[in-house]
Image (spheres, rainbow, N blue to C red):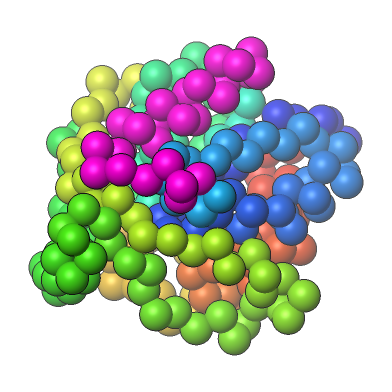
Amino acid sequence: MNSRKIVLVQGAWGSSASWTPVAQRLRAIGHQVFVPSLTGIGERRHLFNGAINLDTHIADVCGMIEAEGLDGFDLVGHSSGGMVITDVADRYAARIRSLVYLDAFVPEDGQSVFDLSGPDIVLSTLTAAGENGGYAVPPPVRSYSRIPDDLKHYTTMRSAQPLATMVQKIRLTGAHRSIARKLYVAAGIDQSAAFAATYARIKSDPAWETTQVESGHMMQLEMPDEICRIIDGFIC
């Protein structure tokens, strides 16, 4: 088996520890795995402030890439982590082997999470933020019944998401399009309308590979063995 360098980027509200079960499995089969933490959420929620935006989280990942001197790596993003990895891919296209999106946003230049979410989700998000001081969106009520009991503790570090990460529009040069290998993994259970629209768009694009798994949105915790198998199979 070829050992690869893999960067895993989390989505909104959670901790980078949501990747731990998948990261452990990938490392056990020989890969080098890097999991950056994002400022103001999860294990870094003590750093929350109203100035945190999408650029902040992009800088978190870029800083880790530079600190580790990564080259020839594979980049994986979950949920709103798709926004982050798209910008990172635009900056580091020449150093990235492949992109994997797990039930994630795939933005075009000038789009935000709100642009990709639909009016109903935007309205409910703004309402929740307004009830939380206007700067952050509290975690949504979500069922974790499909997550194995011994992995549920990885959901305990949920925290409010800085609103500006959802409002800020991404700016892309288009360099990320030069990365030929791209995979989109969609949730097959209780799929959000926002991600269903993204999946439908990507599935019709011949530049992408796609697959769907019988999992809810938190697939890296609901079925870590399968997600490890999919990532390993695609990047190798």
4 w.r.t. 213: above or below: above
Image quadrant where residue 172 sits: top left
Determine whether, in the image, residue 95 is placed left or right of residue 31: left
Residue that sits furthest to the front in the current view: 46
Determine whether, in the image, residue 99 is placed left or right of residue 117: right
**Residue 32, position in %: x, y?**
77, 32
Image quadrant where residue 194 sits: bottom left
Determine whether, in the image, residue 148 is placed left or right of residue 187: right
Determine whether, in the image, residue 147 is placed left or right of residue 91: right
**Quick check: is 65 in the magenta stretch?**
yes
- Give the magenta-colored segment's residue range: 44-72
Tell me the quarter of the image containing the N terminus: top right
Q: Residue, x 57% and y 21% (percent of image)?
A: 65
Q: Residue, x 62% and y 82% (percent of image)?
A: 146
Which of the pair 82/135 is nearer the observer? 135
Which of the pair 52/115 is nearer the observer? 52
47 w.r.t. 125: above or below: above
**Quick check: is 23 in the magenta stretch?**
no
